[in-house]
Image (cartoon, rainbow, N blue to C red):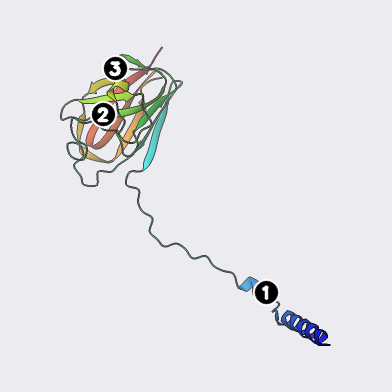
Amino acid sequence: MRKLIIVLVLSLSVISCKNDVKKTDKKEHENNVTKSVEDKTPKKKVLSPHTSTMAMIGDAHIHIDYSSPGVRGRIIFGGLVGYETVWQAGAHKATWLETNKDLVINGKVLPKGKYGFFTIPSKGDWTLMINKNWDQHGKDEYDAKEDVLRFKVTPIISDEITEHLEYKIKKSSESEGSISLSWEKVTVGFPFKLKQ
């Protein structure tokens, strides 16, 4: 008898719990939509955004990939970027240049491929280097022995400031073009032609 009473009490408890469950009708459910809260945290501005430029010269596809630092009121050449020292010609990772055709630069052949692009800024002529090691952080692993091309150019000084480092590839004809970089008041560049 005692077992029967326990079973009855338990059964009544379960039935009682089932009756206490509130049934939500469809309208009530639709009116209780949870709204997402918008993140009002200000997004941090990227100071040296990653960018690239590319162009077709004849059937040659030329691509330059770099990070573009800003002047932000600083003295760049002879200040942030020291004279007579190797610079990766951008920020963060080394700037790289890729071509799917052989190019002739400064009278020498640059075989098709992907290369690191480095400079040595100076008060006078700059040294430009195209290097086998394109995948490196900054100039950490730069080795002059891996230069494929190394040549001098004369910078053009302007009164206008180019706030962010900018590369340009300009087409002169179906077989010739030029590559330049501009930052602060300085532009350096060089012509090239497709190898025939």
Instruction: Place residue 128 in its image quadrant.
Output: top left
Mark 2 in CB contact with mark 1 (< 8 angstroms): no
Report the mark closest to the observer, 2 or 3: 2
Up-down: is 17 above or below 63? Answer: below
Distance from disc 1 to disc 3, alpha carbons, whole Å, reads 77 Å
Q: Which residue is mark 2?
A: 119
Of residues 165 and 147, the one nearer the viewer is: 147
Residue 36 located left or right of residue 62: right
Residue 180 located left or right of residue 196: left
Q: Which disc, if any, is residue 106?
A: 3
Instruction: Place residue 196 in its image quadrant.
Output: top left
- Mark 1 or mark 3, which has the lower sequence index? 1
Identity of the residue drawn at 27% across and 34% down: 182
**What kind of residue is marked 1?**
Lys
Q: Position of residue 56 (x, y in %)?
A: 43, 25
Q: Which residue is mark 1?
A: 27
Of residues 59 and 70, the one nearer the viewer is: 70
- Mark 2 or mark 3, which has the lower sequence index? 3
Few, some or many C-alpha atoms within 10 Å of disc 1 (few <14, some 14-19, many ≥20)? few
Up-down: is 6 above or below 175? Answer: below
Identity of the residue drawn at 62% across and 73% down: 31
